[in-house]
Amino acid sequence: MTAKLIYPAMQAADIFAQGVHIAHAGMDQRKAHVIARDVALQLRIARLEGPQGTAIKPVALHHALLLGLRRPPVWPVPADAERDVYAAMKMSKSDPASAVFVHDTPDEIRDKLRRAFCPPGEIAFNPVLDWIDKIVFRIAGGPLHVERSEANGGPVTFDGYADVVDAYTSGSLHPMDAKAGLGERLIDLLEPARAHFAKPEIHAMLEELDAVAA
């Protein structure tokens, strides 16, 4: 209970301590950002200032949360616990197995997706389907191509998320094929980031950060 009282205030204080004019975070951070905007014009220290030196409120931008790749803490998810389970499942950099990082190698991405929770025929609380929806179609605009052997139905391309849902719930799209298709799409999408982090000076900075966080 104490953490629930203190943590939002600390999140709001971070914005002013760092001089952040545009706060970008997941939907779960909205309340902390509302607090920051509510107190912004009342602060006497560490306030945010505009071009004329007057106090201003931070701009708050929010994006949908991605589910982490691990199994939910309880499965099946009870209807009265859906909100809490969704929050508990969000992708987190503090749990590397639950997330794909922009600098992950193709093999690391494939391995993480191979191990991901992906119950057959289930859409809700399925991180693989969640990522296909939000990343492959909403952000990248599709399509999703799945390479399969002829024995398993042959290669297939989905032009919309509804088609993926239909195939997955009917059983014509196997969980491992969904994982493989998502993995290859992520590898393609993240290639520019991998190239950036492969630069010697950038890679050295990343290694330094990893060493500090270890």
Image: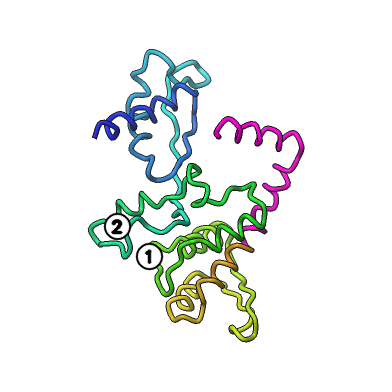
Residues at marks 1 and 2, CA–CA distance in whole angstroms? 10 Å
Residue shown at the point (73%, 43%) measured from the top left: 198
Which residue is the extreme one toward the top?
44
* Residue 189 falls inside the magenta stretch: yes
Horizontal and vertical percent for residue 39?
A: 33, 24
For this view, does 44 lie left or right of residue 193?
A: left
Which quadrant holds residue 47? top left
Which residue is the extreme one toward the right?
200
Q: First in sequence: mark 1 or mark 2?
A: 2
- How many numbered markers are drawn? 2
Horizontal and vertical percent for residue 156?
A: 61, 78
> Which labelled disc corresponds to residue 203?
none
Residue shown at the point (74%, 33%) measured from the top left: 201
Horizontal and vertical percent for residue 100?
A: 56, 51
Q: Nearer the viewer, residue 100 or 131?
A: 100
What is the quadrant of the C terminus in the image?
A: top right
Quick check: 140 above or below 177?
Answer: above
> Which labelled disc corresponds to residue 82?
2
Quick check: 165 above or below 185?
Answer: below
Q: Nearer the viewer, residue 207 or 137?
A: 207
Quick check: 94 above or below 80?
Answer: above
Region in magenta: 185-214
- The amino acid on which the numbered mark 1 sits, given as a three-letter code, is Ala
Horizontal and vertical percent for residue 144?
A: 59, 69
Residue at image mark 1: 124
Which residue is the extreme one toward the bottom?
151
Classify mark 1: helix, strand or loop: loop
- The amino acid on which the numbered mark 2 sits, given as a three-letter code, is Glu
What is the quadrant of the N terminus in the image?
A: top left
For this view, does 74 lie left or right of residue 154?
A: left
